[in-house]
Image (cartoon, grey):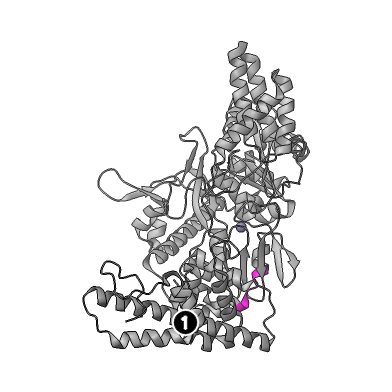
Amino acid sequence: MATYSDAVLDEIRSRVDIVDIVSQFVGLRKAGASWKGLCPFHAEKTPSFMVNPARGIFHCFGCGVGGDAFGFLMRQDRLSFPEAVRALARRGAVELPEERARGGESDREDLYRAMHLAETFYAENLWRAGGERARQYLETRGVDPTVAKRFGLGYAPDGWDSLLSFMRGQNIPDDLLEKAGLVVPRQTGGGFYDRFRGRLLFAIRDLQGRVVAFGGRAFGDEQPKYLNSPETPLYTKGQTLYAIDLARDAIRAKDRALLVEGYLDCLMAHQHGFPETVATLGTAFTPAQLALLRRYCGEVVTFFDADAAGQKAAERAEELLEPSRDSVAWAVNRSGSFADAGALRLRVALLPAGHDPDTLLRSEGAGAFEECIGRSRSLLSYALDRALTDTRDMSGARGRATAFARIAMILSKVSNSEEALALSREAAVKLGVDAAQLWIEAQRLGGALRRPAAGPPPAASAPGVPLAEKELLLLLLHVPASRAALLQIVDEADVAHPPLRALLAALRRRPDAAAEALMSDLPGDAERGMLAALLLDERDWSDAETVETVVTQFSQRFDLKRRLRRIREVSRAIAEGQAAGDVSLPGLQAELQALQREGQQARELTLGGSSEPRSQARPSGPRGVHTNG
Ligand SMILES: [Zn+2]
């Protein structure tokens, strides 16, 4: 898996503090030698996510994920391993040997470079002669030039090949530009032309602040009004949020995110003192976007215009009350209570009719916007009220039945049962139905909806991890002095649990390695999670005498196991030989007898089930252990 040498990886590990890195994303509290917090990778209410700075590892006892600083960044920011290595190398000021990684990797690097050059080109065009039209547009929209510069706004000049010829000057091949979504192939005659022409450009960045896409806004009535980059290897729609790189720190500090739709809504909010604002890139928000925000805060406020379009958006939001496929559950709490620490509280702020955040901020100022946020309600209570309002238009039993079903469905998605109970009482009164009936229906739907999620890798404490095997690996990892003796007598066949066996194999390949350094040798998440779990064991291994006793016990146990295995092999060989008609196997039989003499325990364990010795081997039963010749 590693494309960098162990020495380089070890150096990076030693230079970065994993507590530092993790606490950018997770609130951590000291707990013994480790730090503890709410797992960013699964929804939980009590912290089971541990970080150990001495070992440089993390592990979640809830969902089983674990690893080192590289593994954390890969998971958190969706980086490839080389990307995580480079990110941490920069952080730790470790110089990397200029190894060119695999082709795919260098491709991505080239794409990032092309996007970066394009951003520079567009930004320069905004502020130099020729960009007057765009600058004037920003002025009429009230965008402060310093904000425009911080967001990296740009201008794509009119003309078909402004960017193309600039890129040719930089030796960037045309097909790379096409891959990056910056140019479009001509219908006839071959060649390409610029995708963005005569538009104001917004740079969309990833969490590392690298440009992955552009959004272009027309100045006049040109269609479409907004033109975005297509999906590329760097950019997947609905997975990222505009300005997340700029807003991340503020979102974490305020424990809330403001989620708006448009680029200018977002810019204006930042300009008016709401730096925790991100935009969905013009579409309704997706579960992936909410899961992204869940990493940094506990509350998201989204804005709906009090008109029909806003109502549509609210309906769509109801669907999102379901846990996403990333298994991040969010509950919407009417009271806005902080008791539900694992859930993302999703609130709805209603804008005055005809306003979006941009126009409200420009015409009424930050105070009005803040008031609007202050009046926000939980998405759930909003959705319930809307379901009730709709009933008024539906007369008769049929309308009530529809409303009943819809409200029961909404209630079934509330994770906090106390809240759900209170809400169903309230809704029942308003609907004129029996509260108990509504509650029962919601429970029934809830049971049907809550499908078991795809299982995360088992934690080290999970059933199915043989205790003796786990103890052995604990000893090997925590007491390097035990390795020489134990690795000689322990066989991979002695360890049945696959992740533990992979760990043993990794130790055998590098018996001198520090335990945590084995992280990058392991093939998968299950193995890395297991290693992290074992490294977090806080047992005191400094008592040499105890350690010696344990090593001796293990030596004896595995010596015994090895003999038992040999007894089984020899027994089988004898039985098979006899089945084939060969009745003279004196060597094997002598060995078997010797083995059996060696241990009372061995005899009990292997032969206890076949204590009736037979004088004749049964041809059909090679598995029957034959004990006397
Ligand atoms: Zn977890």
SS label for mark 1: helix
Q: Picture coordinates of residue 519 (x, y %)?
A: 53, 73
Which three-letter amino acid code belongs to the residue tagged 1? Arg
Q: Picture coordinates of residue 261 (x, y %)?
A: 59, 39
Which residue in the structure is indicated by mark 1? Answer: 508
Closer to us: 198 or 388? 388
Q: Picture coordinates of residue 332 (x, y %)?
A: 68, 39
- Residue depicted at x 57% and y 59%: 76
Considering every residue shown, the one lying at the far top of the view is: 396
Q: Is residue 627 above or below residue 23?
A: below
Residue 112 visible, this angle = yes
Q: Is residue 528 above or below residue 220?
A: below
Q: Picture coordinates of residue 62 (x, y %)?
A: 62, 58
The C terminus: image quadrant:
bottom left
What secondary structure is the magenta-colored segment mainly?
helix
Question: Whereabouts is ligand 1, in terms of quadrant?
Answer: bottom right
Closer to us: 116 or 391? 391
Magenta span contains residue 555 = no
Closer to us: 237 or 359? 237
**In the image, the residue with mark 1 has its CB under 8 Å from the nearest atom of ligand 1:** no
- Residue depicted at x 56% and y 71%: 531
- Residue depicted at x 67% and y 60%: 48
The part of the chain drawn in magenta is 14-19
Q: Is residue 412 above or below residue 608?
A: above
- Residue depicted at x 72% and y 30%: 423
Residue 505 in the figure: left or right of residue 480: left
- Which class describes the residues within 10 Å of circle 1: few (<14), some (14-19), or many (20+)? some
Residue 534 in the figure: left or right of residue 36: left
Residue 314 visible, this angle = no
Q: Is residue 364 above or below residue 127?
A: above
Considering every residue shown, the one lying at the far left of the view is: 581
The N terminus: image quadrant:
bottom left
